[in-house]
Image (cartoon, helix red, strand yellow):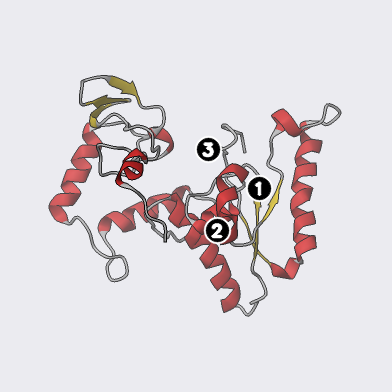
Amino acid sequence: MTNVSNSARSSIPVPNAGTRVLHRTSTSIPPRAVRGEGIYIFDQNGKSYLDACGGAAVSCLGHSDPDVRAAMHAQIDQIAYAHSGFFSSDAMEELADELVASAPEGIDKVYFVSGGSEATEAALKMARQYFLEIGQPDRKYVIARRQSYHGNTLGALSVGGNMWRRKQFEPLLITASHIAPVYQYRDQRDDETPEAYGLRVANELETAILELGAESVAAFVAEPVVGATVGALAP
């Protein structure tokens, strides 16, 4: 057993000294946001920041929008929470109707979760359960694309294709195969038309399916528009 002296212990840097929150960087404390207005966030000193990152996550409608605030207040006046394992609600049913109405043909059900990582995890589990239910238990492999991002939890990280994010957690991840993204800027050859390049990349999916065994593949995971790890690629 190693003993650490008081002097040595005091020299060990404390992450985010001065706060009980374990922030995303251990070397500094971020500004404290106290209010939002439209596309701006204001800190405790009154400084304004253009919120260029919230839109990618949960603030795409802007901050303090009066219609959004009114809708939230009206819902809280009725009921703030009801466990979806036992209850439905008007808000849930109405949103599901609207999502299905704008979804591609063939999608007629909605499953609500708390965020993108959980959505990816649920989709992977649903794919597995579906094939178990129809008597195809050998389907277990998932194919995704390199430089993709599907969430921060272990299952979502497993199908994500950003090697920097994955590297330190590799021993914990489920097995997934990765093919090339559609990334014309770096990967399209000078002698290729856009159509030829698209077909070449699409054929990588067929090759991966055949290598794994068509009867063993459960899902292909791909985002319509890549943003977090490649930079706003078109579908």
- Confirm or deny contact between disc 3 and disc 2 (CB under 8 A): no
Q: Distance between the residues labelled 2 and 1?
A: 25 Å
Q: Which residue lies furthest to the left in this view?
A: 77
Picture residue at 19% right of the left edge, 39% below the top = 70
Identify the amino acid type marked 3: Ala
Q: CA–CA distance between discs 3 and 2?
A: 29 Å
Q: Mark 2 points at which residue?
A: 106
Amino acid residing under circle 1: Arg
For the N terminus, the quadrant is bottom left
| Vertical placement of residue 197 versus 132, above or below | above
Residue 148: give x, y in percent of width and height. Answer: 59, 44
Helix, strand or loop at mark 1: strand
The first of marks 3 and 2 along the sequence is 2
The reply to whether the C-beta atoms of the residues labelled 1 and 3 are less than 8 Å apart is no
Q: Is there CB contact under 8 Å for labels 2 and 1? A: no
- Image location (x, y in percent) of residue 184: 71, 32
Give the x, y percent position of residue 44: 20, 26
Single out the residue that lies furthest toward the right: 191
Is there any visible trace of residue 26 in the rendered image? yes
Residue 173 in view of the camera: no
Q: In which quarter of the image is residue 62?
A: top left
Q: Report whether 78 appears left or right of 38.
A: left
Look at mark 1 in the image and give the residue it sits on: 145
Examine the rendered structure and indicate whether residue 85 appears above or below residue 177.
Answer: below
Identify the residue at image location x=28%, y=54%. 91
- Label 2: few (<14), some (14–19) or many (≥20) C-alpha neighbours in 10 Å: few
Q: Mark 3 = which residue? A: 228
Q: Check disc 3 and report its element: helix, strand or loop.
A: loop
Task: Classify the position of the C terminus by image quarter.
Answer: top right
Residue in front for this viewpoint, 14 or 232: 14
- CA gap between label 1 and label 3 equals 13 Å
